[in-house]
Image (cartoon, rainbow, N blue to C red):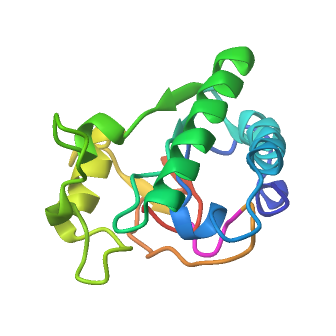
Amino acid sequence: ADKLSGFGDEAFDEVFIVVTSADVIDDETKVESIVEDYEKLVKEAVRVSKSGIVNISSVCPILNCDTKDALAKDINKALAEMCEKQSVNFINNDLNFTYMDGSVDEDLYAADGQHLSAKGTLRLLKNLGLTKNRNAVFHDKVSTRGRGTMAQLGGSPTSAPRVGPGAN
């Protein structure tokens, strides 16, 4: 939220918040603290959005760790509830990252199993409604937790920002 304070009011048409699983899930993660962080972030995101539209992407499914994946699902459930209360859009990636049997589509992840592959990144962008026709501004190292990085993909200052350290 502090990183957004540097932007003026109504600096962007619409705001998308995308946070990686590595940014929110570790051995000390508490769902309640994650939701509190998001609530602060949403408040600032609404302020910098001309339309007041804020979109929160769910944490993508996590490969090879059932405990962390279950925690991601708990976080997503809590975020969906928070979004409903605050009239914020919640974009659930689970159905587009998993097969009907619930297993994760491993082709969407890089060889390390943590980061998205090119195919996974395109899937995430499609889920967010970002097509070739929309420019996106990606801000490096904007995070509720202060960890991670995000690639600079270009765009114009009036296009929708991606707030978060990565799209994973």
| Residue 43 on image: x %, y % | 81, 36
- Give the overall secondary structure of the magenta segment: loop
- Tally of numbered discs: 0
Q: Is residue 74 left or right of residue 48?
A: left
- Taking the magenta stretch, the answer to whether it contains residue 119 is no
Name, please, the residue furthest toward the front. Answer: 67
Q: Is residue 75 above or below residue 110?
A: above
Q: Is residue 147 above or below residue 135?
A: below
Pick the front one: 51 or 128: 128
Q: Is residue 40 left or right of residue 19?
A: right
| Residue 13 on image: x %, y % | 56, 36
| Residue 93 on image: x %, y % | 36, 40
Name, please, the residue furthest toward the bottom. Answer: 112
Q: Quadrant of the C terminus?
A: bottom left
Is residue 88 visible in the rendered structure shown here?
A: no
Q: Is residue 43 above or below residue 112?
A: above
Residue at 30%, 49% (x, y): give it.
125
Q: Quadrant of the N terminus?
A: bottom right
Residue at 52%, 52% (x, y): give it.
18
Residue at 23%, 71% (x, y): give it.
117
Is residue 155 visible in the rendered structure shown here?
A: yes
Pick the front one: 107 or 103: 103
Q: Is residue 7 left or right of residue 2?
A: left
Magenta region:
139-143
Residue at 74%, 38% (x, y): give it.
42
Quarter of the image holding residue 109?
A: bottom left
